Amino acid sequence: MKVCVYGLGHIGLPTALLLAQDHAVVGVDVDPDRVANVREGDLPVSEPGIDELYAEVREDFAVTTEAEPADAHVLVTPTPLEEATDVPDLRAVRSATESVAEVLRPDDLVVLESTVPPGTGEGLVVPILESSGVDAGEFSYAHCPERAIPGRTLVEMIDNHRVVGALDEASLDRALELYTFVEGEIHATDVAAAEFVKLMENTHRDVNIALANEFARMAEELGVDVHEARELANEHPRVDVLRPGPGVGGHCITVDPQFLAQRVGSDRLISLARDVNESMVGHTIRSATDMLGSPPATLTVLGVAYKGDVSDTRRTPALPFVRRAQNAGYDVRVHDPHVESFTVDPESLDEAVADSDCLAIVTDHSEYEDLDPTALAERMATPQLLDSRAVVDDEAWRDAGFVVRVLGDGTC
Ligand SMILES: NC(=O)C1=CN([C@@H]2O[C@H](COP(=O)(O)OP(=O)(O)OC[C@H]3O[C@@H](n4cnc5c(N)ncnc54)[C@H](O)[C@@H]3O)[C@@H](O)[C@H]2O)C=CC1
Ligand SMILES: CC(=O)N[C@@H]1[C@@H](OP(=O)(O)OP(=O)(O)OC[C@H]2O[C@@H](n3ccc(=O)[nH]c3=O)[C@H](O)[C@@H]2O)O[C@H](C(=O)O)[C@@H](O)[C@@H]1O
């Protein structure tokens, strides 16, 4: 079938390429530069296997800025929180749906993959589609939320189980015809349940990370090493404590719980968990400034991506960490091997650590596990390390002459 995919971003582009293995796909994006880049093979998304997949399917994959008539329209536009109001910003979903309504025909399928507040499909998307003059029932509609994790996007898009919230039987059948690349099981439900399931998943993760962060802070007060305690607790067959850190980043786990909390009046735990996770940046910066003493001093931040081994900096805890250290009067240098375009201070590691007074690992990139503490100690003015992700062998760093604090190990 002919498929139009709206939004060629972190999720839309890999989805379009996977769909192009079995269908004729047109990628539609409002950003003309992005369209031109994708057309030339300069992909805006870096994920294992994506360049190879692009090369494989490029004959069956076109890109454009305008909606086209198609048998299926897949919406993968962004759904952030609006910065000024902290309210879900559904403008891209609205405008993409309006574009589809202009070309919609009876028997077409429309799929919303974007993560949305409960009720968005039947309350907002379907009515806009019906403004075309084609009624729901004549066209098919389904919500198929994406659940792949950045860093493993293609593998998880193929292997993960998928939830399809279909408007009716015909919509479910059409969605099954579309998602031929999915090897995981496909579970059918209704539209509202599919919206809710997606939000439950990310909220579950946010709340559990908050618990890990609370354990870390308690362990610090009690002089216990939370990392050792966590490993021991996780030997229990029904316990899985997540990893504490300097805060939760990314534009999903930090945002999606608020889609739920803002929609209902009965939220308590979800907002509290958000607060706990947001408070970790302040906690981590206090540890760093405690080590540094009064300014002037130089702090080298290792990692600005929101998590290890990705290049995405959206809602990263590293950015407020950097700003707060700068506001406190420290010279701050930033290093990240995955984020070339980061504008704070993209220096090489050697330059970033020269004469520095403290290193702070804020992102758990694999590269930081293998740093050579002896070589680093020689380059620094004061060899100190704050490891907020517990990624290094702290004893080896101490042996190399570093003063080391690890978030949650009872020494902060
Ligand atoms: N990035 C991730 O890891 C995951 C994201 N999601 C959800 O997927 C959705 C998309 O997120 P990302 O791919 O990360 O977004 P993104 O920001 O990487 O890309 C969005 C793309 O949509 C384009 N766009 C905006 N308005 C448009 C319109 N009216 N018509 C056509 N294109 C338009 C933008 O120019 C951009 O290229 C969001 O709802 C997000 O919550 C779900 C699971 C994982
Ligand atoms: C339930 C779930 O695992 N959701 C995934 C999540 O992807 P995302 O990369 O945002 O999740 P993540 O790996 O938990 O990272 C989020 C943030 O949480 C932090 N983090 C994560 C795990 C942990 O034990 N401790 C911790 O502090 C990370 O460093 C990062 O800053 O959100 C994605 C999404 O919805 O966009 C979703 O598709 C993914 O499957």
Image (spheres, helix red, strand yellow):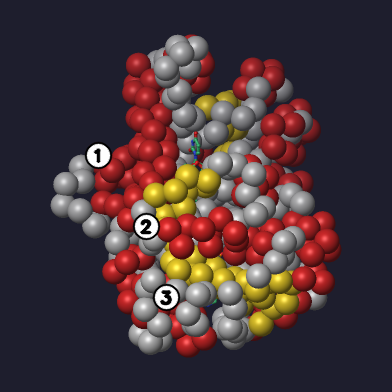
Quick check: 142 above or below 246?
below
Contact between marks 2 and 1 (CB within 8 A): the answer is no
Q: Mark 3 points at which residue?
A: 138
- What label sits on residue 269 in the rendered view? 1
Secondary structure of the residue carrying numbered label 2: helix
Quick check: 30 above or below 38?
below
- Let me know if residue 121 appears in the view: yes
Q: Does the residue labelled 1 lie within 8 Å of ligand 2?
A: no
Q: Which of marks 3 and 1 is nearer the N terminus?
A: 3
Q: Name the residue under label 2.
A: 191
Categorize mark 3 by other alpha carbons within 10 Å: few (<14), some (14-19), many (20+): some
Is residue 64 or residue 168 the one in the foreground?
168
Left or right: where 405 falls relative to 202: right
Counting from the top left corner in percent of width and height, residue 283 is at 39, 38
Residue shown at 36% from the left, 30% from the top: 211
Q: Which amino acid does label 2 sit on?
A: Val
Q: What residue type is labelled 1?
A: Leu
**Across the whole image, how many numbered discs are drawn on residues?**
3
- Let me know if residue 328 appears in the view: no
Contact between marks 3 and 2 (CB within 8 A): the answer is no
Q: Which of marks 3 and 1 is in front?
A: 3
